[in-house]
Image: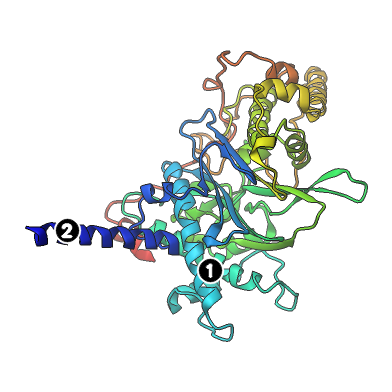
Amino acid sequence: MGSCCSSPVKLNMKKKKKKMRKVRLGGSRGVEETELLKIAERKFGNSYSDVACLFTQQGMKGTNQDAMLVWENFSSKEDTVFCGVFDGHGPYGHMVSKRVRDFLPLKLCSQWNVNLSSDKNNNEIGSIDSEETASVNMDDEWCHSDFDENEKFPEMYLPLRQSLLQAFKLMDKDLKLHPTIDCFCSGTTAVTLLKQGRHLVIGNVGDSRAILGMRNNGNSLIAVQLTVDLKPNLPREAARIQQCKGRVFSLQDEPEVSRVWLPNSDSPGLAMARAFGDFCLKDFGLIAVPDVSYRYLTEQDEFVVLATDGVWDVLSNKEVVDIVASAPSRTTAARAVVDCAVRAWRLKFPTSKSDDCAVVCLFLDEVSQSSQVQEVDLDERLEKANPTLSAVEDNYTTNAKVQGSNLSTGWVQDPILQHVNTLRSSDEIVPVSDSMDEKLPARSQSTRSLAECISSAEDEEWSALEGVTRVNSLLNIPRFLSSDKSVTNWKKWF
């Protein structure tokens, strides 16, 4: 009896230890969400810590497809923080973004540990087999990066860069083979950041963005864009897609938005050149290779902001930096950015459905939580402590007045986004209308000031669901005959 009772206990303990070991080492197979939730340093909901805060809010298009993550003491290193935001798109975009949020860091941790422990002279760096390594190197040819092997980088950078390339490749393969998430026409962006001491390494896929708030020589706060929005209109991206027989063009109704199309079908119309998933386009120039960059942090650097395009479509880099810097406390900085973005959507595009927003703010000098938490309502603090709102308000009001004066001449000027290398689209993929000549309804401009939007009652109902969607997620999902075995078995392509 005693023997029979003790055997299951030992087996259960072994299974538990094995599962926990996989979490520590970064393995993704067999790791359940409940195990990830036990990691205290890992935050993925609306939360904050001594060094970071994060906040997301659903837009008016349906399920929130944005995901975010802050993981302190990453890879069991006390001075290391991993951050990321992920913007899903397509029918299962919300599932793809959360899958990448949960398992990309684990794969990175595993690859990084292996690369650090491997011999520097060993050409077989990493734990993936030669076929996968060759595929990484082949895709890396298209990596839009200023990486120069002759340039001097810190010792930690090259192994970490290689680990990022491997982890992104393995993550994309994980999505291809996933039994329940259909990634054929669904995917996600990913802008990830790893800070170790004063070293900052960023890996970017898609059109989410990272910026840095820093002081210049005159002690003025300026914004520095750390990533490039990887859109199909970039010459290098367009060249790769066209070389792989994919097509890049924009529609009549949105000439400023370049999209990726299949060779012989006007679908799906993806508004980015790199993404996880979206395997209908992976043979035609779409890749999941990250653009990896490095920056050494100085005393002038104050914070980094990662955000999805729901923020950048309505706020410039400088506006976001000013909002974070003037937030009532560090614990509310991310929410302040999201709140301002939501209200800017209402002001600038009142007939459009606002996009999901997700923001991560990483502060480069630690301050205790007790000195940051304040018991004042956020909206009241924003009105009192955010001087940039008046500047944003004046800018938007001026645009509205200019457009109003142009109505009499029959010409309407669309508001111009002030950020660099960003398209005006708010999503990734959009539906094709029955007629290409059919025009979208004109985008009306609100005459309400930003202060009026902010001061509106919290319980006031506002909805743009009856309005037009500025840019939908999918233009057209490809349709194939069931007899086409090469399509029905698409997961076997890889």
Near-viewer residue (322 or 313): 322
List the single residue furthest toward the left.
1
Say left or right for 159 vs 433.
right
Q: Is residue 341 left or right of residue 479?
A: right
In this figure, which residue is indicated by the disc labeled 1? 112
Q: Which residue is mark 2?
A: 8
Label 2 is placed on what type of residue?
Answer: Pro
Find numbered disc 2 in the image and state the secondary structure of the residue it sits on.
helix
Against 248, residue 393 (above or below) is: above
Specify whether 397 is left or right of 114.
right
Quarter of the view holding residue 402? top right
Residue shown at the point (51%, 30%) measured from the top left = 61
In this rendering, the answer to whether 457 lies above or below 360 is above
List x then y, in percent, for residue 175.
41, 56
SS label for mark 1: helix
Nearer to the camera, 128 or 415? 128
The residue drawn where x is 52% and y is 61% is 76
Q: Which is more toward the observer, 484 or 225?
A: 225
Q: Is residue 8 above or below residue 45?
A: below
Image location (x, y in percent) of residue 392: 78, 29
* Label 1, label 2: how far apart the Cα atoms are: 36 Å
393 in relation to 308, above or below: above
Of the numbered discs in the image, which one, if any, rests on residue 32?
A: none
Report the quarter where the N terminus lies. bottom left
Q: Using the rendered image of the protein, determine whether residue 425 is visible from the camera's viewpoint.
A: no
View extreme (right): residue: 218
| Whole-percent x, y for residue 31 in the image | 36, 56
Mark 1 Cα-neighbour bin, 10 Å: few <14, some 14–19, many ≥20: many
Q: Is residue 333 left or right of residue 165?
A: right
Amino acid on which the number 1 mark rests in the picture: Trp
Total residue callouts: 2
**Residue in view at x 60 percent, y 26 percent:** 352
